[in-house]
Structures are given as C-alpha cells and as structure tokens.
C-alpha cells in the first residue's frame, strides 16, 4: 500500500516514514504543500498523511485542491492544534480523519487501517485464494498446500497485489507502484528479485506453478499456464 506523507518537520517525517515502512507501507515524503500537489497529480496513492501547517501552501488548501480533482484518496490530517474549529476546518476541506500531535505510532497505524477499510464502498476480500495457495490479509498468513509459508513484508505485498487480480497480467510498474516508494521502484529489477523470491518459496516445492512471466508484459498469478510464458 502506497502512502504520501506530507510533513515539513524532518524529524517527524523520518520517524513516521520509518514506522510505516516497518509495517510494510511504501512511503513517499513531501515537505511543502507544493510538493504534495505535485506528487498527488503524478502518482495514485492509497493513503495520504497531510500536515496542516506547511510551507508554500497550507494543508487545508492542499486538501481542497486534491478534492477538486475528484480524487477520493483517504486523507489523514496532522496538526499541533487541538481546537474544535481546527478539526472542523480539516474535515470541511475534505479530510477523512484528524490526528493531533504528538501521537503514538500505534494510533496512527490504527487510523490508517480504519481509513483503508472505509475507502471502498465494498470491503476488500480478506482471504484470497488461487488453487491451493491462500493469503489472509488480516493475519498476514500465507499457506500453500495447507502448509504455512513465511514471507517478508514486501514479498507478502507483491503476492497480495497479484492475488487480488488473478489471471490478470500486471506490469512491473503496476506492481511496484503499489508496493514501493518512488526511489525504489525506479530500480528496474526490484520486482524481478521479489518475484524470484516468491517462486522459490511458493512454486519450487510444488509441481503446479502459479506465478507466471508473460514475455514482454509482466507477471500474473494463475493455476493455468500459457505457451508464451517463461516460468
């Protein structure tokens, strides 16, 4: 899940970015309101954390401008101010939730999980399955043939991305944009490395191969192979 973090205080930004990445989020950081709008116009984010007091353009204006584009990205506003009027202003600008500094990382993570659940009118499936492979997004447990498979957080995210759209061919860019931040996914082979790791853990011990490479296109997960695949 890809997050845009907009916070001008570098220490806070670094702390929050590290905490989110430890939980498997892909985080891009902006430090001014102008940078936030530039990022939002160029990349489709799953969540946004937006400070109110920002250089160049304040967070309330940023939020309004993003909503004017029709974007429904869930926005959590951060502020050092706890007045009711400030909370109302943030929500009226289009924010979905409000968190006052200082805050505990556990609370921030809980708010983000809640926003993510509410972001779709229809809740996402929490148990995904392709053939004898299952992935539980709530417990973050993966099983193949009834046996648990231990995955690193980014491996889990790549697998979830594939399993949410079984049979569909996803390009490397489509996968990377939902799993890594900008600096990482511009490294051309990062997706290939994680696909190899997943194959070693999920496919190599089994006769039926599920993760397929579509020549010149990308990857897909399927219980059926095709003639133009390199597996």
Image: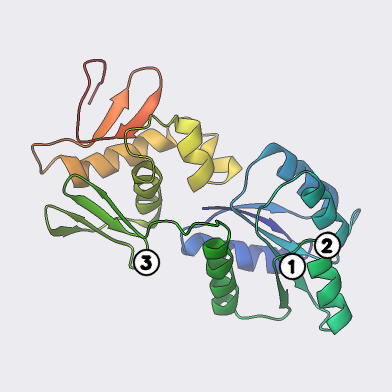
Task: Tell me the residue at 83%/75% (across/down).
Answer: 88
Describe the element under mark 2 as helix, strand or loop: loop
- Please give left or right for residue 226 compared with residue 38 in the image: left
Describe the element under mark 1 as helix, strand or loop: strand
In front: label 2 or label 3: 2
- Please give left or right for residue 92 compared with residue 12 in the image: right
Q: Do residues under tags 1 and 3 come within 8 Å of each other at their CB atoms? A: no
The residue most toward the bottom is: 83
Q: Do residues under tags 1 and 2 come within 8 Å of each other at their CB atoms? A: yes
Task: Tell me the residue at 47%/64% (across/down).
Answer: 23
Describe the element under mark 3 as helix, strand or loop: loop
Crowding at dot 1, Cα within 10 Å, few <14 / some 14-19 / many 20+, comes out as many
Residue that carries the numbered disc 2 in the rendered image: 93
Residue that carries the numbered disc 1 in the rendered image: 77
Scheme by which the image is coloured: rainbow
- Please give left or right for residue 143 compared with residue 45 in the image: left
Task: Tell me the residue at 41%/36% (across/down).
Answer: 191
Task: Tell me the residue at 48%/63% (across/down).
Answer: 22
Q: Quadrant of the C terminus?
A: top left
Q: Do residues under tags 2 and 3 come within 8 Å of each other at their CB atoms? A: no
Q: Nearer the viewer, residue 171 or 19?
A: 171
Residue 90 position, x and y percent, is 81, 68
Q: Is residue 100 above or below residue 114?
A: below
Q: Earlier in the sequence, mark 1 or mark 2?
A: 1
Q: Is residue 183 above or below residue 145?
A: above
Residue that carries the numbered disc 3 in the rendered image: 138
The residue most toward the front is: 122
Q: Earlier in the sequence, mark 2 or mark 3?
A: 2
Q: Is residue 200 above or below residue 150?
A: above
Q: Is residue 19 above or below residue 184?
A: below
């Amino acid at each position: 899940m890809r997050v845009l973090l907009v916070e001008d205080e570098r220490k806070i930004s670094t702390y929050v970015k590290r905490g989110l990445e430890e939980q498997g989020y892909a985080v891009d950081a902006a430090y001014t309101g102008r940078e936030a709008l530039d990022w939002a116009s160029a990349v489709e984010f799953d969540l946004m954390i937006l400070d109110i007091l920002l250089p160049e353009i304040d967070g309330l204006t940023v939020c309004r401008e993003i909503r004017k584009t029709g974007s429904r990205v869930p926005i959590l506003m951060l502020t050092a101010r706890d007045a009711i009027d400030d909370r109302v202003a943030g929500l009226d600008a289009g924010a979905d939730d409000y968190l006052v500094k200082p805050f505990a990382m556990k609370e921030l993570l809980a708010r983000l999980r809640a926003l993510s659940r509410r972001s779709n009118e229809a809740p996402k499936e929490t148990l995904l399955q392709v053939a004898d492979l299952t992935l539980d997004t709530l417990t973050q447990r993966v099983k193949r043939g009834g046996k648990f498979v231990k995955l690193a957080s980014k491996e889990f995210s790549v697998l979830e991305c594939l399993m949410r759209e079984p049979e569909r061919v996803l390009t490397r860019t489509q996968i990377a944009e939902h799993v890594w931040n900008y600096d990482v996914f511009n490294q051309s082979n990062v997706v290939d490395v994680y696909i190899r790791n997943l194959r070693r853990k999920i496919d190599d011990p089994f006769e039926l191969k599920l993760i397929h490479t579509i020549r010149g296109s990308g990857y897909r997960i399927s219980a059926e192979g095709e003639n133009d695949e390199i597996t």
